[in-house]
Image (spheres, rainbow, N blue to C red):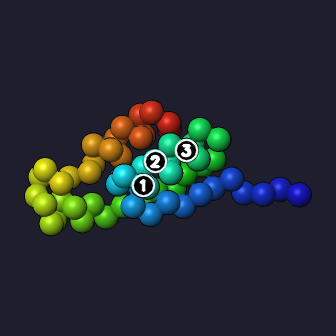
Amino acid sequence: MYYMSIILITGSERLIGSEAVEFFANFGYDIVGIDNNMRQYFFGADGDTNWKSQFLGNEFF
């Protein structure tokens, strides 16, 4: 039997979500990460989490 190896992670650029991305990527899962970057809206440029998305993309994909 074939099982899909895709995991959907919401909030993938934040602390818990990004750790989950790293954890499951290390086990060979395909990750679909979704994050709306609302931290930038609330906290301004200092709260922007796009850097984490770029890091995860370069590190694991």
Q: In the displayed structure, does residue 26 sit left or right of residue 5?
A: left
The residue labelled by disc 1 is: 16
Name the element at disc 2. helix
Label 3 vs label 2: CA separation? Answer: 6 Å
Query: In the current view of this chain or complex, which residue is farthest to the front?
Result: 16
Q: What's the amino acid at mark 1?
A: Ile
The residue labelled by disc 3 is: 23
Circles 2 and 1: CB atoms closer than 8 Å: yes
Total numbered labels placed on residues in the image: 3
Name the element at disc 3. helix
Name the element at disc 1. helix
Label 1 vs label 3: CA separation? Answer: 10 Å
- Quarter of the image for the N terminus: give it: bottom right
The residue labelled by disc 2 is: 19
Q: Is residue 59 above or below residue 12?
A: above
Marks 1 and 3, the one that precedes in the sequence: 1
Circles 3 and 2: CB atoms closer than 8 Å: yes
